[in-house]
Image (cartoon, coloured by chain):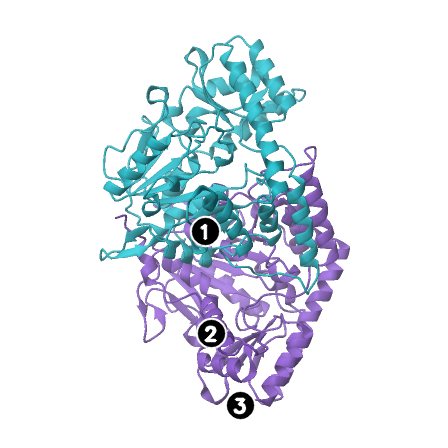
Chain colours: A purple, B cyan
Amino acid sequence: MTQINHNYTLLQGSYLFSEIAKRRTKFMQDNPNAQIISLGIGDVTRGLPDAITKAMHDAVDELSNPSTFRGYGPEQGYDFLINDIINNDYKARGIDIATNEVFVSDGSKCDVGNIQEIFSQDAVIAVQDPVYPVYVDTNVMAGRSGKFNKETNQYENIVYLKCDASNNFTPSLPDRKVDLIYLCYPNNPTGMTLSKEELKRWVDFAKANDCIILYDSAYEAFIQEADVPRSIYEIEGAKEVAIEFRSFSKTAGFTGVRCAYTVVPRELKAKDADGNAVLVNDLWNRRHTTKFNGVSYVTQRGAAAIYTPEGKAQIASIIDYYMTNAGIIREGLASLGLEVFGGVNAPYIWLKTPNGLDSWAFFDKLLSEANIVGTPGVGFGQAGQGYFRLTAFGSRENTEKAVERITKLSL
Amino acid sequence: MTQINHNYTLLQGSYLFSEIAKRRTKFMQDNPNAQIISLGIGDVTRGLPDAITKAMHDAVDELSNPSTFRGYGPEQGYDFLINDIINNDYKARGIDIATNEVFVSDGSKCDVGNIQEIFSQDAVIAVQDPVYPVYVDTNVMAGRSGKFNKETNQYENIVYLKCDASNNFTPSLPDRKVDLIYLCYPNNPTGMTLSKEELKRWVDFAKANDCIILYDSAYEAFIQEADVPRSIYEIEGAKEVAIEFRSFSKTAGFTGVRCAYTVVPRELKAKDADGNAVLVNDLWNRRHTTKFNGVSYVTQRGAAAIYTPEGKAQIASIIDYYMTNAGIIREGLASLGLEVFGGVNAPYIWLKTPNGLDSWAFFDKLLSEANIVGTPGVGFGQAGQGYFRLTAFGSRENTEKAVERITKLSL
């Protein structure tokens, strides 16, 4: 028989959200009348703004007519969208990005999962702990992780940068040579951010130590405070060391519509086997054009509408809705004496579980006693043990109801 | 500096269609008044059928309302679409496929490109020659190709199965042990098909030799003749040895809308490092859920409309339109004494270049003298040298005009 990619056998159990779905389904089967509120998986709930749906309707009509029909588009995305991205997300902030540095895709999960392919199999990767599982799992599949150590709950060849209350969720610098550093800010799952000075420390570190930062900024739209950097390219020299990932999923309700983009600056270099410098942008372009065929035209038109005056206003109001939810959760739980983090510049609230409960025990307690589904912190890594993530993406009614139910628990 | 995936340095030149686009752009710059007709890249030109656009409009409306909004769907696709696929494409032909064997994706290019990831890096791959470049390039990137030999125009570790007029484009069986065999029928680029008996020979070979067939059936909808198999699973025992890829791109004008699916039967097994059998379906499910986040809901609703009575009728009429074009090209060129293949059960016509011209020389001649863009056969592999691909996806007017222009050439 054909041999499998044996790295797959090193993967641990189910993907986190599958396990949550399984426990939730089991509970619902046993308790068919329970009114479950999900503040678990980070999925949005508001409808798409009118400016976006109008643009999508128009695009569907265009496709229905042979004279305006569009088939294959550029794999990297249409210029109309790339230019909107550059002008609004970068140029408006004084950052100079060229059209061939932006790659539109069908989701940041794909991009952050696929980016490792263009680097050496020997690359040492560093991730924050806790961490979005996709960074780790895709490197396990690629053979960069080594074995999983059940005692430490970590892979032996991955460098984990601990982020917990003891360091105010600011990751410690790696204690050995690393090649690729995944940073996520505003952070999923902790909801915390880095200041410009802290982010500069990472850019400087990457420069001094010849490594590349993979900067996942999927939650940028939720930043409320002025001094929090919205792009890693706000830091001088970052274009020489960083790839930035952005998504419309949470910004504009695109979790079911699928659009994101990745910026790979032409200044960013890596080296080939002979030590010659290679443009990472060229490698990603080759990967993207060989294995991907572009994002739905209808979706790209919808994404471009995000940048119209109407689109911007409508999105701002949705972000405001979610961030009001975040405040309700944050303040509601804090008033119960719980230790809460995040929720100020991000739609995630990260709480210390009460009475030293472990994360899954608190998950089960919250599910069975309050019928609330959240996400166990330990599912994001060992440093998340004893923490728990709630999201601000529910409806206002459910968010308020959830906080009320938690208030009634004996914690 | 961080090391790159050095396999990328083994890739040859640009991706075929980028090279074509480059030459075309250059010609247009030098000849701004030329009226170019493209019968090159296999992209459709008719508008989306009404049944599909109506379903897409309805889906956009659903997303605009919080009470009907859908965020993340199942990564594998919605059941409504999977059930339509199973009932229409398989059950109706007596083939039993379960819902967890179908994986909806945003394109067959992605699926046929990504499928190799779940197999061993040591797997020996066999491809037809000529071949859709994505099969080869994605295996080069993964380190399975060995070096490129400029003299043979082939990679040293890839097994090429020659398909030319001498064997009626029926691939020769591999002359050494292989693990993964990519077969594409109806074939891109030759437009030829296999009979049931010939396909059975491959299934039997895979069984006898413990290998897996990756069966790309993206052009199935164009099959006109009754005895041509539409699915590899029409062959008994194929579920134990084959993965099948299907696409809505050409079937329903989805090249810009993006939807396809892959069937991975639960009977299909491979082995892990200890020789234990592993379900390939489980591996692909893990890959799909870890690195992909599902297809746009709007797109999936559009795809489901393909299976309604209105959708079926409208699609049949578009397929008929393209196949009439195919007949016009086929008969037009044959009447000039050219040797033509394909075009009966596929939208591709594969022609022997006249007077022993090599493929790119014929490309340049056709571009400069008739202002027609086609695809050089050698771009698909060495066995395609001296052949040329034309597609039936143009408008009727352009197709007729193209044949007329070719008629006037001195060939």
**Dot 2 crowding, Cα within 10 Å, few <14, some 14–19, many 20+:** few
**Dot 1 crowding, Cα within 10 Å, few <14, some 14–19, many 20+:** many
What residue is at 65 percent from the left and 51 percent from the top?
A85
- In the rendered structure, the answer to whether residue B126 lies left or right of residue B186 reads left
The outermost residue toward the bottom is: A410
Question: Quick one: A193 or A332, which is closer to the camera?
Answer: A332
Q: Which residue is mark 1?
A: B102
In the image, residue B346 sits, relative to residue B205, either above or below, namely above
- In the rendered structure, the answer to whether residue A11 lies left or right of residue A186 reads left
- Residue B166 screen position, x and y as percent: 33, 19
First in sequence: mark 3 vs mark 2: 2
In the image, residue B30 sits, relative to residue A287, either above or below, namely above
Residue A330 showing in the rendered view: no
Residue type (three-letter) at the residue carrying disc 3: Leu
- Residue A343 screen position, x and y as percent: 61, 75
Q: Secondary structure at mark 1?
A: strand
Estimate the spatial distance between the alpha carbons at disc 2 and disc 1, rounded to whole Å: 24 Å
Share a chain, discs 3 and 2? yes
Chain under callout 3: A
Question: Quick one: A343 or A256, which is closer to the camera?
Answer: A256
The outermost residue toward the top is: B410
Give me the disc on residue A26. Answer: 2
- In the rendered structure, the answer to whether residue B354 lies left or right of residue B163 reads right
What residue is at 70 percent from the left and 58 percent from the top?
B64
Residue type (three-letter) at the residue carrying disc 1: Val
Share a chain, discs 2 and 1? no
What residue is at 41 percent from the left and 19 percent from the top?
B386
Q: Which residue is mark 3?
A: A411
- Residue A15 screen position, x and y as percent: 43, 65
Residue type (three-letter) at the residue carrying disc 2: Lys
Q: Secondary structure at mark 3?
A: loop
**Dot 3 crowding, Cα within 10 Å, few <14, some 14–19, many 20+:** some
